[in-house]
Image: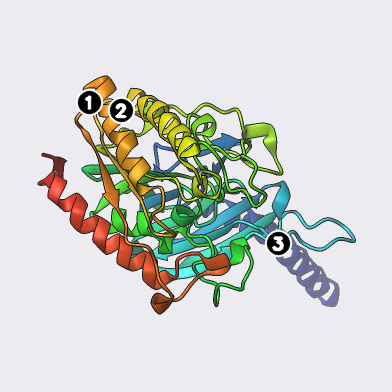
Amino acid sequence: MKKSVFFVLAMASLISMSCTTTNSASNAADTASEELVIAPDSTNVKILGRTFTKNNTLFLAQSASAIEFEVEAKSLTVNLTGDTTARPYRGTAIPSNLARLTIYVNGELKETVTMDAQKKSVTIFNEKKVQKASVRIAKITESAQSYAGIKELVLDKNGKISPAPAKDLKIEFIGDSITCGYGVEADGANNSFTTQTENAEKAYAYLTAKALNADYSLVSYSGYGIYSGYTGDGNRNTLSLIPPVYPKVCFNYSDGSKNNLEWDFGNFKPQLVVINLGTNDDSYCKDQAKKQLYVDSYVEFLKDVRSKNPDAYIVCSLGIMGDNLYPSVEKAVETYSAQTGDKRIEAFHFVPHTAADGYGADWHPSAKTQANRAEVLTAHLKTLLDNGTIK
């Protein structure tokens, strides 16, 4: 009798152990099956700005490039990848000009992420009940300094995402550091450049697009010009010119592997193109002869912009950091129009910023100045529109 009881208990114990082992394996499999992993592309998210794909990862390149999507899920996590400039090297300091991203849920800023590691994972929400939300993930720093990749969006197994709806109005902005939001979050003019105080979402271009409820694309590089980039020694800077990089997806100082990628202008067809270039040319074009060279180069650039945007109305602006070359902008517009017969173009003057509104890093526009100039530009562009289309 005692032997029989012992045998039964032993068998029960073995069965219990067997069930426990099976359940552990089953739990691991269930955990994996409870996730839906999505590589972002144009079929599941709306892509804004110039981007490229590498190793199934969508890299945000240009300033304010972003993805926007609608989600219906209990949980949402984004797995991010840095480029080579975001990888901390052994025994050295982490590079300072790292990419920064913003994550919005239903229009509210949830988190700002600095890519100070090669990989980062951010849980956007994790709830017991299904959440319906609009999500935006954007890169707020410029391509010349660093990229950031969105490798995966991870949802619970029943989660769903779809691209945010496209907007009727589309605007392309072509500019320099002002458009990039250079130093807009710095304490003052004596601060030097770092991507940690650069924020394109606080610059006039993005703010204008937002106010007009427009989709947008930015092509902007700090220090760049049309005939000369910024120069501190009086010599022409031919290394920092917008016309050669305008047809490209991006340019980066540290990683040249993507510098020759051609941009497909069929991806984004704007009704408006706003150009804000000349601030850096002004550091070189001090006499009339050089100003004429700026005009000539601008005219040729306008021909290229028009060839790539045949249906757009072009606005050539200047003045936020000084308007010395604004008469040359007007002359370039007049010359271009006379040569081509194209009347769908105009010059637009920005009032220069002043100390009263403060300064960003290296005497760049403050957040207050950027917001004000966005209001001014928005009001003007509205006069060109009729129910969201050009008159």
Q: Can residue 297 be seen in this view?
A: yes
Q: What residue type is labelled 1?
A: Asp
Residue 59 sits above or below residue 367 on the image: above
Q: What residue type is labelled 3?
A: Ser
Q: Which residue is drawn at 83% across and 55% down?
A: 89
Q: Name the residue under label 1.
A: 342
| Tag 2–tag 3 contact (CB < 8 Å) | no
| Tag 1–tag 2 contact (CB < 8 Å) | yes
**What number is the disc on residue 170?**
none
Q: Which of 298 and 75 is in front in this view?
A: 298
> Distance of mark 2 from mark 3, alpha carbons?
42 Å
Residue 14 sits above or below residue 138 on the image: below
Q: Which residue is drawn at 56% across and 36% down?
A: 53
Numbered-mark total: 3
Image coordinates of residue 373 in percent, x first then y, are 32, 62
Query: Between disc 1 and disc 2, whose residue precedes?
Result: 2
Left or right? Give the position of 94 relative to 263. Answer: right
**What number is the disc on residue 336?**
2
Image coordinates of residue 388 in percent, x first then y, are 15, 45
Left or right? Give the position of 287 relative to 273. Answer: right
Query: Between disc 3 and disc 1, whose residue precedes?
Result: 3
Q: Residue at x 42, y 60 (%)?
A: 201
> Distance of mark 3 from mark 1, alpha carbons?
45 Å
Q: Which of marks 3 and 1 is in front?
A: 1
Q: Name the residue under label 3.
A: 96
Mark 3 packing: few (<14 Cα in 10 Å), some, or many (20+)? some
Mark 2 packing: few (<14 Cα in 10 Å), some, or many (20+)? many
Image coordinates of residue 54 in percent, x first then y, are 61, 35
Give the structural element (helix, strand or loop) at label 1.
Answer: loop
Q: Which amino acid does label 2 sit on?
A: Tyr
